[in-house]
Structures are given as C-alpha cells and as structure tokens.
Image (tube, helix red, strand yellow):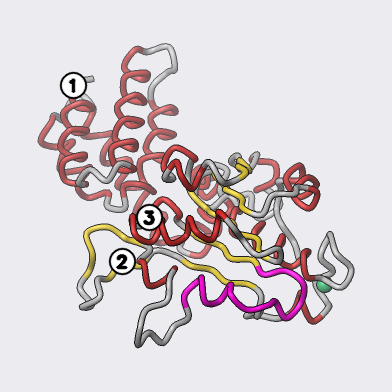
Amino acid sequence: MKVLGHRHILETLPRLKAQTFLFSGPEGVGRRTVARWFAAGLNCAQGFPPCGACPSCRLEPHPDYLEIGPQSETKTGRKARLPQIRLEQIAPREGQEEPSLLEWMSTYPRFRVKVAVIDGAHWLGEAAANALLKLLEEPPGFARIVLVAPSRELVLPTLASRSLEVGFAPLPEAELRTLSTDPEALAFAQGSVGRLRWALEHPQDLARLTSRVEGVLEAMGPRGGPAQTLEALQLLGELEEALPYLARRLGQALSPEQPAYRQALEALAQAQDALAAYVSEDLVVTWLALRLARL
Ligand SMILES: [Zn+2]
C-alpha cells in the first residue's frame, strides 16, 4: 500500500489513541489515501505498515471500511445548489435500502476495527451532524471515525472539538516529481497528487485551462478592462480548481515586489474564501473581475 509523502503522519497515526480524527488539508494531497492506509493497517494481519497482501489489505470493498460523501442531487433527482451529506446517510430511516452509518457501526467488525470516513465533513447538514455527534460522543470501542475537510474552521465546532486534527500540507514538488516531471502538470498540481493525476490523465483539459488562465492575464493587461476580465473569468469554470492556478501564473507574470501582485493575490484569496463560504459563483466572478481589472 503506497502513500506518497506524509511520512510524519504515517509514523504518528498508528500511535494515536483517539477514535475520531479530522484530516484537514487541501483537496488532492492524500487525506483519503491515508485514511484507507490507516484502515488497512488497523486490520492487517501484521499491523502497521499494512502488508498489502493479506485478506484484510486486499479486500476491496472491505467489510469494515465505509466512506460517506456529499451528494449533489436532491431527493427528487434535481441538481442541488450545494452538495450535502444528508441525515439518511448518517441515521437509519424507514424504507431505506442503503444502510446508514449508524446502522453499519452497530454491528461488530469482521476483522478488528471498523473505520468510517466522512468525506467532505464540511457539507454535513445540521440534522446529519447532530446524528453523527451521538456516535462521536460514545463510539463503540472498535470504531474509528475520520472526518475529511479542507480546514477545521469549516467543520461545525461541536464535531471539530471531538476530533483530533491531523493536518495535511501540500506535497513538496520533489515528491510529485517521482510521478511526473512535466512542468505544466507540476505547475497545475501545486502539491496535490490528485491534481497532478488529473493533469496527466486529461492533457487536453489542462491545455484548455492553461489557455483560459492566459486569457484572464491578457484581459487584465493594458489592452483589456473590467468587461474583458469578467468575460475571461466566466470562461474559466471550476473556479475552486482554476483560481490557485491563476494565482501561480500571476506570480510568474508580475514580479513579487509590485503592489499589484500582492493586491491580486489578496483578491484571489478573498474570492476563494467567498466560494468556501458558499457565495454564488456569479457574484464572486463579478467582484473578482472588478478587483483584478483595476490593478
Ligand atoms: Zn495486510
């Protein structure tokens, strides 16, 4: 079972006595991979590090491992405005086919430990979070619960206060270079294995994103203006992915001493905070266009 980087976390995690963890850090740096590695080691015949060959390491899906994530469709099948982890994913409901987390956790493990991963714990609805809280308050001895979220601040305080935070940093470029030395892909990845894999698997999408980011830089230039910047930003799409990349390209286009560079980075950081706080993407783009075009 190979995990790229995070050596310190892999060394400490098996020794931690907590039952509930909060894996915080940016998307794609390996939080879910480490959660699977952790679950494998807890049930592996030889313990940590997991051997990768015993029945417990090989089983996929594993009877003692459960991942729950946000759903972006409403119950009637329409696209929801925001993804959400719903109450029925956590607590049982009458007539429901899929077992909920609480039901799954109510039976003994087949091996030694049951590990539940709540991916996107910042998308837990209030009712779902309250149901989960009951489990976190008195988890059975065989249970480990891993909440995965971008940061502690985004998770409800009642849940965060019952979890031991394990912070994941972006991977150093040297680690990522073991997977690829493509400069464009590495520039896009910015310390994230997930982003690097995406870039390597979707070269055409990466090329399109790259040219659209160049379009924004051009629209911000002397021949552009607010309208052109707005248009270029609207073309970007997938803002949460594109904005960090834009920030990096700005860093290459403007020198760090220029006040415009600092202002642009501030504007991009504020735009990302706004997106994380679920402000509408249209609004963020318009605001950002006005800020960037003024630099
Ligand atoms: Zn094993």
Of the two numbered discs 2 and 3 in the rendering, the one whose residue sits closer to the viewer:
3
Q: Cα distance, mark 2 to mark 3?
A: 10 Å
Identify which residue, 79 or 121, lies in the foreground.
Answer: 121
Q: Residues within 10 Å of mark 3 (few under 14, many from 20)?
A: many
Evaluate if marks 2 and 1 touch, with contact meaning CB atoms under 8 Å apart.
no
Q: Which residue is mark 3?
A: 123
Residue 117, percent from left and from top: 56, 62
Q: Which residue is mark 1?
A: 294
Secondary structure at numbered mark 1: loop
The residue at 26%/38% (across/down) is 216
Of the two numbered discs 2 and 1 in the rendering, the one whose residue sits closer to the viewer:
2
Residue 213, percent from left and from top: 32, 42
Q: Residues within 10 Å of mark 1 (few under 14, many from 20)?
A: few
Give the left or right position of residue 284, taking residue 177 as reference.
left
Q: Characterize the magenta stretch by its predominant secondary structure.
A: loop
Precedes in sequence: disc 1 or disc 3: 3
Precedes in sequence: disc 2 or disc 1: 2
Q: Amino acid at mark 1?
A: Arg
Q: Amino acid at mark 3?
A: Trp
Mark 3 C-beta closer than 8 Å to ligand 1: no
Q: Amino acid at mark 2?
A: Ser
Q: Cα distance, mark 2 to mark 1?
A: 36 Å
The residue at 40%/56% (across/down) is 130
Residue 112 in magenta stretch:
yes
Q: In which quadrant is the N terminus drawn? A: bottom right
Secondary structure at numbered mark 3: helix
The residue at 23%/20% (across/down) is 295
Determine the image quadrant of residue 107.
bottom right
Residue 116 in magenta stretch:
no
Please report the bounds of the magenta region as a residue range. Answer: 100-114
Q: Cα distance, mark 1 to mark 3?
A: 35 Å
